[in-house]
Image: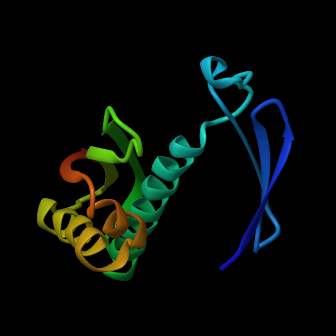
């Protein structure tokens, strides 16, 4: 895996991923940024949410569960001193489907965080990770 990050101006950067996609990042105004794009650490959190949501949907689909939607809301705290690593992250999964069993969703979340999600495995080195699940039955 590779990427290239290039400084644009001010505190704005554009990243090109190895798969050919572009992502823009910017700093907060108090750090010289113009608040035009997500902060780099927000991108870490976004990537972690995407990684675990991907796993949960894939695991449920492979188990032939009727999943119709999945979102994960992440709420994180960071250390007060540099390096300002994440110290706590709460993952709240909202999973929609027809006839989904809580046990199946809990298993998918646990497998993601214990075995498959590389991003949360890395963040678990500095942060306490907590999870909650909300199931919504769809007609």
Residue 9 horizontal/vertical position (percent): 87, 35
Quadrant location of the N terminus? Answer: bottom right
The residue lying at 21 percent from left, 53 percent from top is 129
Residue 81 quadrant: top left
Q: How many marks?
A: 0
Q: Is residue 38 visible?
A: yes
The residue lying at 20 percent from left, 69 percent from top is 110
Q: Is residue 3 left or right of residue 113?
A: right
Q: Is residue 14 left or right of residue 104?
A: right
Q: Is residue 20 left or right of residue 97?
A: right
Q: Is residue 135 above or below residue 3?
A: above
Q: Is residue 126 above or below residue 27?
A: below
Name the image colouring: rainbow
Front residue of 69 and 106: 106
Residue 71 horizontal/vertical position (percent): 41, 47
Front residue of 87 and 56: 87
The residue lying at 82 percent from left, 68 percent from top is 20
Residue 115 horizontal/vertical position (percent): 28, 80
Q: Is residue 90 visible?
A: no
The furthest residue to the top: 30
The furthest residue to the right: 8
The furthest residue to the left: 103
Residue 102 quadrant: bottom left
The residue lying at 35 percent from left, 78 percent from top is 116
Q: Is residue 79 above or below residue 114?
A: above
Q: Is residue 111 above or below residue 27?
A: below
């Amino acid at each position: 895996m590779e990427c290239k990050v290039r400084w644009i101006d001010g505190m704005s950067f554009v990243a090109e991923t190895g798969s050919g996609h572009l992502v823009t990042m910017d700093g907060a105004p108090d750090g010289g940024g113009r608040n035009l794009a997500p902060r780099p650490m927000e991108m870490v959190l976004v990537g972690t949410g995407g990684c675990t949501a991907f796993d949960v949907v894939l695991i449920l689909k492979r188990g032939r569960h009727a999943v119709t939607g999945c979102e994960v809301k992440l709420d994180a705290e960071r250390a007060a001193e540099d390096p300002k690593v994440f110290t706590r992250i709460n993952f709240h999964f909202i999973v929609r489907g027809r006839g989904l069993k809580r046990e199946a969703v809990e298993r998918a979340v646990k497998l993601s965080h214990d075995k498959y999600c590389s991003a949360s495995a890395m963040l678990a080195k500095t942060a306490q990770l907590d999870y909650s699940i909300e199931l919504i039955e769809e007609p």
